[in-house]
């Protein structure tokens, strides 16, 4: 990997806004801010802070890495749409990285990557099976130690390390990995009555 290749990666799939900058194999800067809302407003300023800390600019980037989930529905949409927009404007690839792959980055022992979900459930990616949402007890009974996502800054770094290996390729545009439907639903109120003024 060329030492002058810069990749910026970020993630908002959980209750954080996290970003990391790599130059080749070297971590230049990484930061995560805990937040349950407000990632849309904070993400780009945080990225600019990371770039400034590394003495780089948007134009120096060779690729963008982004966490595509699973996780918070809105948070995933924020990060993926930002990555796609930045990639388009900078004319560089955006690389979508699942949180499962980021968890497994640098993990040599057998494990079951797991992402916390509400109501004592977890998202898992069992070997040879499609990713799924299961009860925590069922995941623990599968016989492999569960490996959960590292703290935000380390998660963003793992995403960047996977993304930097894709520099020179032409990956598909990142897309959210949703394993369950959104909790929000359209309003079920009856439509308003329209009064005919001519009656």
Image (cartoon, rainbow, N blue to C red):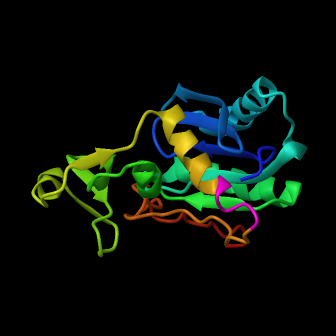
Q: Residue at x 26, y 54 (%)?
A: 111
Q: Is residue 115 left or right of residue 83?
A: left
Residue 178, image x, y percentages: 45, 63
Q: Quadrant of residue 31?
A: top right
| Quadrant showing the C terminus | bottom right
Of 69 and 24, nearer the camera is 24
Taking the magenta stretch, the answer to whether it contains residue 199 is no
Q: Quadrant of residue 162?
A: bottom right
Residue 50, image x, y percentages: 72, 30
Q: Residue at x 48, y 63 (%)?
A: 177
Q: Quick check: can you spot residue 156?
A: yes
Q: Is residue 57 left or right of residue 131?
A: right
Q: How many marks?
A: 0
* Residue range highlighted in magenta: 164-168
Q: Is residue 44 above or below residue 173?
A: above
Q: Quadrant of residue 124?
A: bottom left
Q: Is residue 115 above or below residue 176?
A: above
Taking the magenta stretch, the answer to whether it contains residue 165 is yes
Q: Quick check: can you spot residue 78?
A: no
Q: Is residue 30 above or below residue 168?
A: above
Q: Main secondary structure of the magenta part?
A: loop
Q: Residue at x 65, y 60 (%)?
A: 95
Of 59 and 79, nearer the camera is 59
Residue 192, image x, y percentages: 55, 62
Q: Is residue 17 above or below residue 168?
A: above
């Amino acid at each position: 990997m060329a030492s002058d290749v810069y990749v910026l990666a970020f993630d908002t799939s959980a209750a954080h806004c996290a970003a990391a900058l790599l130059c080749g194999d070297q971590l230049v800067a990484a930061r995560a801010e805990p937040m349950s809302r407000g990632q849309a407003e904070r993400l780009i300023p945080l990225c600019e802070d990371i770039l400034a800390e590394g003495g780089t600019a948007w134009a120096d980037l060779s690729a963008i890495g982004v966490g595509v989930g699973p996780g918070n529905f809105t948070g995933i949409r924020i990060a993926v749409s930002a990555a796609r927009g930045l990639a388009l404007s900078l004319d560089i690839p955006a690389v979508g990285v699942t949180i499962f792959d980021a968890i497994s980055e640098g993990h040599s022992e057998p494990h079951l990557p797991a992402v916390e979900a509400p109501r004592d459930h977890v998202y898992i990616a069992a070997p040879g099976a499609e990713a799924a949402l299961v009860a925590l007890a069922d995941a623990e009974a599968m016989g492999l130690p569960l490996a959960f996502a590292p703290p935000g800054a380390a998660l963003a770094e793992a995403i960047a390390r996977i993304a930097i290996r894709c520099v020179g390729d032409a990956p598909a545009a990142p897309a959210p990995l949703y394993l369950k439907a959104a909790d929000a639903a359209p309003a079920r109120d009856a439509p308003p009555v329209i009064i005919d003024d001519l009656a």
